Amino acid sequence: MTVSLRAPAPLARAALALAVSLTLAGCAATASREPVTISLVAMNDFHGNLEPSRYVPANPDGSKAPAIRAGGAEAVAAALQAWRKEDKDLLFVSSGDLVGASPAMSSLWADEPTIEAMNMLDLRVSAVGNHEFDAGRKELLRQQNGGCDSPRPAKACQMARNYGGAKFTYLAANVVDKATGKPFIPAFRIEEVKGIKVGLVGVVLEDTRSVVMASGIAGLEFGDEAAAINRAVPDMRRQGADVIVALVHQGGSTPENPMTPGCSQLKGPIVDIVRRLDPSIRLVITGHTHQGYLCKVDGRTVTQASSYGHLLTRIHMSVQKGAGSVGEIKVENVLMKAGDYPADEKMAAFMAQLKDSSRAALTRPVARLASAPVLRKQNEAGEAPLGSLIADAVLAATRNVGAVIGFMNEGGIRKDLEAGEGNIAAFGQAQAVLPFGNTLVVMDLSGAQIRALLERQWNKDGSMGSMLQVSNGFSYTWDARRPVGSRVTAITLNGKPLEDGKTYRIVANNFLAEGGDNFPEFGKGSKRLETGLLDLDAFTDHLRAIEGEGAALAPAAPRIIKVQ
């Protein structure tokens, strides 16, 4: 008797089908576990710099190269256009201060041109920076949502009558509305890229309240950055986030080359924040300190791209779907220089139109002067009416953060302050005086350091060199008959002698603050606050505030006194 071991045909086919399906399922499971590369590009602290501005690159050895013009919307647009041809799913993100303390071409129009440029660049999210609060929470919400109900009615909706708001999302996990106990804008946003859900969470520095007007943030509470990010992680996971990226508007500094990955000497508030983050967060994109770096902190990648669009950070992150596992993270900072990539024609056209509109706006009146012109020519002691006026202006703009003395370098004053009919100065005439777009830096100096920097105003041969202009209430006497290095005989502040061992809060533009014009003492200042406030804005605000009060006249009493 013969027994057949072959299964009936229908059963055999079912078994075969099951085997094939299990094999395919296994292949699919394996494929789903294949790492996916996510491409991100990050910027920070753009501050409305739609046009290129001065940037000092770093040489490979860390020394400073000659200054160049870099950044601007057209250079950024060209780079992004080229990189999206390599990866159409590229995510463009920001870690704050897109606007605020902006040059005239953006600030003239309540920063709406910058928001529109970011829309054109397909920015997806931005952490809120402290400067987004410069005009208050109401204006921040208007910039996000659109409309014309603004605390700056003379600027809002003047470029276009139908301002539609930001297409990207501002994030602030640590800014809570006291009335509701919840974030007053979203804490995070999830973007799906190549089947991977990327959670993007943003925070601003906890100390924002100390650097913005209290009235603009009334009703808001600023919390610990790391704690707020960590609180958001479970919610992002519940919404399916495979990987989480932190956008932090706080930073640090390092002496290492900003273009070299793997820096290990990062210092500043960001280090503690990073160390306290949820272990799953492997990438932290930072801002606020206007530095460039590509660092490692406790195994995490921490980046910053300088400021004003001078650099962009390119990031390639390997992610395994489902497992939430982040593999290799490659980062590089790339210089944004005109002509390095083919032009983005739409952005070029937008900028051309904006420049035409802005040229007309530059003729708008600022203030009526008591007399004109206000001269930058110095008297025999080294004091100039225009220099004194600017020093007063920068002090007035920063008294709210503790400044008591204002300094201005004579080389930064490029023209006399002219005026038109009726002694009315136009915005363009004020801008001609201060054309560099310098920002104001507040710092602490000892009386001895102030004395030392004043002594550096004379050349080795005894002739007058670069003379600092000083604010009202501060004065000093110098004697040309004494040797260089010991010419200053007396210094007073509000009628009282300056004490060598006492600390004074001073303000100067960022050029001086870096030790420019051979004044290294400024570079040694402590408790530095990069306000981001433009010297030009401080100047025009001051002209309006003192309109008709003799702004164009020499100070009633000399501030710099030469012994005869």
Image: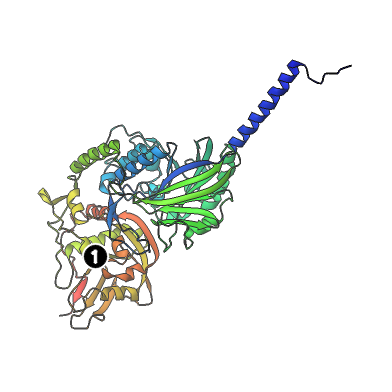
Compared with 303, 3 (above or below) is above
Q: Nearer the viewer, residue 392 or 271?
A: 271
Image quarter of residue 479: bottom left
Image quarter of residue 145: top left
- Residue drawn at the location 23% of the way across and 73% of the way down: 457
Q: Nearer the viewer, residue 246 or 77?
A: 77
Residue with the most extreme front position: 1
Residue with the most extreme right position: 1
Q: Specify whether residue 31 is in view.
A: yes
Q: Nearer the viewer, residue 291 or 456?
A: 291
Amino acid at the residue labelled 1 = Asn
* Residue 79 place in picture, x, y as percent: 35, 43
Q: Specify whether residue 248 is in view.
A: no
- Tally the marks: 1
Q: Which residue is mark 1?
A: 409
Quarter holding the C terminus?
A: bottom left
* Residue 297 place in picture, x, y as percent: 52, 57
* Residue 404 place in picture, x, y as percent: 33, 65
Few, some or many residues within 10 Å of mark 1 (<14, 14–19, 20+): many
Quarter holding the N terminus?
A: top right
Left-right relation of 540 to 298: left
Left-right relation of 85 to 240: left
Residue with the most extreme bottom position: 482
Helix or strand or loop: what does disc 1 sit on?
A: strand
